[in-house]
Image (cartoon, grey):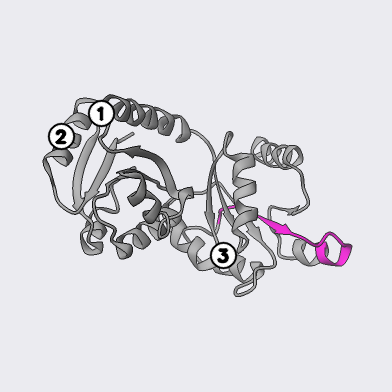
């Protein structure tokens, strides 16, 4: 697995250059990007993770990173003072933050953390990938927390966001909310089926309605299966584990 990071800062300072050299010593290819959105766009494809050496709050860049992290299941490491970090969290939520390091940076701790990150990533790459599509972010996070030890779990809060994510990432299973408000699950499934690159990915519907008529409507769309949203952690694991065993 390639080990690539992008280091973001307002300027390529002596400290940033030092980080690049230290990362190179442990086999990590680090490139510099300014904190301007147009520069970040040039570096978005290759980085496994972003390191933000924060010395200036640039809301547009932080919001851009937030959207990018959500779409591509990547995260950000911040190096800054605590006040700047707290301000940055107003634009990029903590759920997208891998680590925070306070300045002055303890370089040995940072390098050890980066080494562990890539070891964990190598182990993660062998796990099956699940994409959850639901407008309820709190519910998605709960499901992600239940499954993340056994699977690579990503989240999208709409059908369009899911298609954008799938254009750049692989999923072995999609958990799709049946009752989303703007574009409901059946319509999203139709969008998936019309896209040759993702039409074969199995989809399980997530539904809050367990009555017979509702289940019949769900099954009429021929998903791989359905999951009631009232399911508990153990039952959810058993259902998904069994699905992959059967495949």
Label 2 to label 1: alpha-carbon separation: 10 Å
| Residue that carries the numbered disc 2 in the rendered image | 18
Side of 84 where 211 appears, left or right: right
Is label 2 in contact with label 1 (beta carbons under 8 Å)? yes
Side of 173 where 39 appears, left or right: left
Is label 3 in contact with label 2 (beta carbons under 8 Å)? no
Start-end of magenta stretch: 200-215
Quick one: which residue is furthest to the left in this view? 14
Label 1 to label 3: alpha-carbon separation: 49 Å
Side of 99 where 24 appears, left or right: left
Q: Residue at x 26, y 34 (%)?
A: 105
Q: Which mark is residue 107?
A: 1
Report helix, strand or loop for mark 1.
helix
| Residue 206 on the magenta span | yes
Q: Which quarter of the figure has residue 128?
A: top right
Quick one: which residue is furthest to the right in this view? 212
Q: Residues within 10 Å of mark 3 (few under 14, many from 20)?
A: some
Label 3 to label 2: alpha-carbon separation: 48 Å
The earlier-in-sequence mark between 3 and 2 is 2
Q: Which mark is residue 237?
A: none
| Residue 87 on the magenta span | no
């Amino acid at each position: 697995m390639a080990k690539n990071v992008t280091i973001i800062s307002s300027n390529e300072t002596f400290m940033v250059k030092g980080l690049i050299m230290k990362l190179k010593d442990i086999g990590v290819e680090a490139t510099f990007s300014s904190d301007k959105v147009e520069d970040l766009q040039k570096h978005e494809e290759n980085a496994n993770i972003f390191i933000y050496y924060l010395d200036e709050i640039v809301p547009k860049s932080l919001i851009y990173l937030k959207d990018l992290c959500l779409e591509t299941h990547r995260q950000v490491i911040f190096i800054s003072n605590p006040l700047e970090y707290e301000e940055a969290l107003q634009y990029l939520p903590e759920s997208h933050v891998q680590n925070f390091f306070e300045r002055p940076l303890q370089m040995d701790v940072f390098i050890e953390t980066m080494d562990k990150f890539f070891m964990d990533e190598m182990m993660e790459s062998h796990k099956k990938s699940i994409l959850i599509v639901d407008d309820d972010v709190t519910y998605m996070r709960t499901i992600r927390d239940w499954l993340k030890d056994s699977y690579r779990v990503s989240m999208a809060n709409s059908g369009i966001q899911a298609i954008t994510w799938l254009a750049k990432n692989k999923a072995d299973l999609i958990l799709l909310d049946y009752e989303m408000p703007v574009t409901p699950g059946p319509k999203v499934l139709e969008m998936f089926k019309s896209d040759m690159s993702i039409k074969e990915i199995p989809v399980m519907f997530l539904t809050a309605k367990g009555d017979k008529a509702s289940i019949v409507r769900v099954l009429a769309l021929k998903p791989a299966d359905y999951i009631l949203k009232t399911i508990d952690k153990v039952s959810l694991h058993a259902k998904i584990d069994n699905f992959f065993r059967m495949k």
